């Protein structure tokens, strides 16, 4: 009995903010500000109706999903060969280059917001999905390279040599043998790329205006001179959790193996 008490209390503690957000989404702003209640006293679906009936709101979710998916695909496509090179070959300055990649991940997004804005405005990419996707690559590719390099280094080099002896070309070996061997690492890298791109606000808001505006930026619309529309903000917040939950569900097995085998 006692050994289940601490984990149960810990889970309740972790789930409390999510429950509170969900409960607020079914309340009016006046009820939220009016007092402390554990559940909605005047249950309402108006907050969700606003989101599903207003194109500005629901297109925000579509826009976010589009550029997040593009970014994840690009990041993995670039990181896989790069991580393989760092894992299998030694060349002049390799460790310095690897460290330099990580320094890009350490820099705050605010440092790059203005350069990206000026660059994309001059080449006609401002307010497009690809603009945000490419901007997020600056942070996600180094992270994906770092994660994947750890998994690839754990695969013996003898696997490469055996495949070449058997007559495989590099492309055949890499995609048919090597990539399936590190699927758990790819799952972990995809998870972190998706989550960073999904929750990042500054670059996404700076590089978009109307056509590609993400849900995180649209949620700031709830602020007005009379205050925040807290019920609407809570409903939008609940819906933003769903894509991340789906991603975790589909890659959960890979994430579990990745945390056990990789360097994350």
Image (cartoon, rainbow, N blue to C red):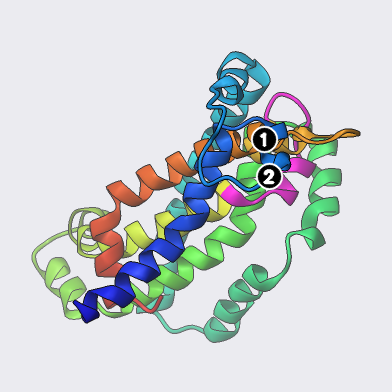
**The C terminus is located in which quarter?**
bottom left
Residue located 60% across and 23% down the image? 51
Mark carried by residue 114? none
Q: Is residue 183 something that shows in the picture?
A: no
Does the stretch in magenta take in 211? yes
Of residues 227 and 187, which is closer to you in this image?
Answer: 227
Q: Which residues are magenta?
A: 199-212
Residue located 73% across and 49% down the image? 203
Q: Is residue 167 something that shows in the picture?
A: yes
Vertically, is 130 above or below 186? above
**The N terminus is located in which quarter?**
bottom left
Give the crowd class for mark 2: few <14, some 14-19, many >=20 residues within 10 Å.
few
Look at the numbered disc 2 and give the secondary structure of its residue. loop
- Residue 161: horizontal and vertical position, in percent? 17, 75
Does the stretch in magenta take in 216? no
Of residues 226 and 64, which is closer to you in this image?
Answer: 226
From the image, tell me which residue sits under label 1: 31
Look at the numbered disc 1 and give the secondary structure of its residue. helix
Q: Relative to residue 197, is residue 122 drawn left or right?
A: right
Of residues 139 and 62, which is closer to you in this image?
Answer: 62
* Residue found farthest to the top: 53
From the image, tell me which residue sits under label 2: 35
């Amino acid at each position: 009995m006692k050994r289940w008490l601490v984990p149960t209390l810990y889970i309740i503690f972790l789930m409390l903010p999510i429950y509170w957000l969900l409960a607020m989404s079914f309340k009016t702003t006046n009820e939220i500000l009016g007092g402390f209640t554990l559940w909605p006293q005047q249950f309402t679906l108006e907050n969700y109706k606003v989101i599903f009936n207003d194109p500005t709101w629901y297109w925000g979710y579509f826009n976010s999903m589009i550029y997040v998916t593009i970014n994840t695909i690009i990041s993995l496509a670039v990181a896989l060969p790069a991580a393989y090179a760092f894992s299998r070959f030694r060349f002049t300055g390799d460790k310095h280059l690897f460290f330099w990649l990580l320094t890009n991940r350490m820099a705050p997004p605010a440092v790059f917001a203005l350069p990206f804005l000026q660059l994309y405005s001059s080449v006609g990419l401002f307010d497009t999905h690809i603009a945000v996707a490419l901007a997020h690559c600056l942070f996600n590719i180094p992270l994906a390279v770092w994660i994947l390099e750890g998994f690839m280094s754990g695969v013996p080099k003898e696997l490469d040599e055996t495949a070449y002896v058997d007559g495989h070309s590099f492309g055949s070996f890499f995609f048919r043998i090597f990539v399936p061997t590190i699927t758990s690492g790819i799952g972990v890298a995809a998870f972190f790329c998706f989550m960073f791109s999904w929750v990042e606000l500054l670059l996404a808001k700076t590089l978009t205006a109307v056509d590609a505006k993400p849900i995180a930026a649209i949620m700031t619309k709830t602020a007005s001179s009379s205050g925040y529309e807290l019920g609407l903000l809570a409903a939008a917040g609940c819906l933003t959790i769903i894509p991340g939950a789906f991603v975790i569900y589909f890659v959960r097995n890979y994430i579990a193996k990745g945390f056990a085998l990789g360097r994350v």
